[in-house]
Amino acid sequence: MANSTAEQIANIGAGERRKRLIFGIAALVAGIVISGLLVFVRAPLLWRLPLIFIFYVGSLGYFQSRDKT
């Protein structure tokens, strides 16, 4: 990459980064709670598979806020 880390410019404001961070953390917490409940009730593994999307969205929000994109 041509740009070093010091040369990167954020393309979103602080408010939008905060929204993405809060949404990412909320999605990750929701995923942990739902997965804990599914383990507690001994749900089949196939029912736990859609949690991939919740964890993906949560991590996407977190990393977008961290990288300021």
Image (tube, rainbow, N blue to C red):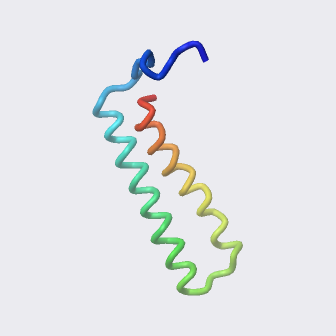
Q: Quadrant of residue 15?
A: top left
Task: Pick whichever, 19 or 4, lies toward us.
Answer: 4
Q: Report the residue that reaches farthest toward the bottom.
A: 41
Give the residue displayed 59% in from the left and 55% down from the top.
53
Give the residue displayed 43% in from the left and 49% down from the top.
24
Q: Report the residue that reaches farthest toward the top.
A: 2
Q: Is residue 3 above or below residue 55?
A: above
Judged left or right of residue 7, residue 47 is right
How many numbered marks appear?
0
x and y percent of residue 58 in the render? 49, 51
Judged left or right of residue 22, residue 5 is right
Q: Is residue 1 above or below residue 32?
A: above
Q: Quadrant of residue 46?
A: bottom right
x and y percent of residue 23 in the render? 39, 49
Give the residue displayed 50% in from the left and 71% down from the top.
34
Task: Pick whichever, 15 or 65, lies toward us.
Answer: 65
x and y percent of residue 20 in the render? 39, 41
Q: Report the residue that reaches farthest toward the left.
A: 15
Q: Quadrant of the N terminus?
A: top right
Q: Quadrant of residue 7?
A: top left
Q: Report the residue that reaches farthest toward the right.
A: 46
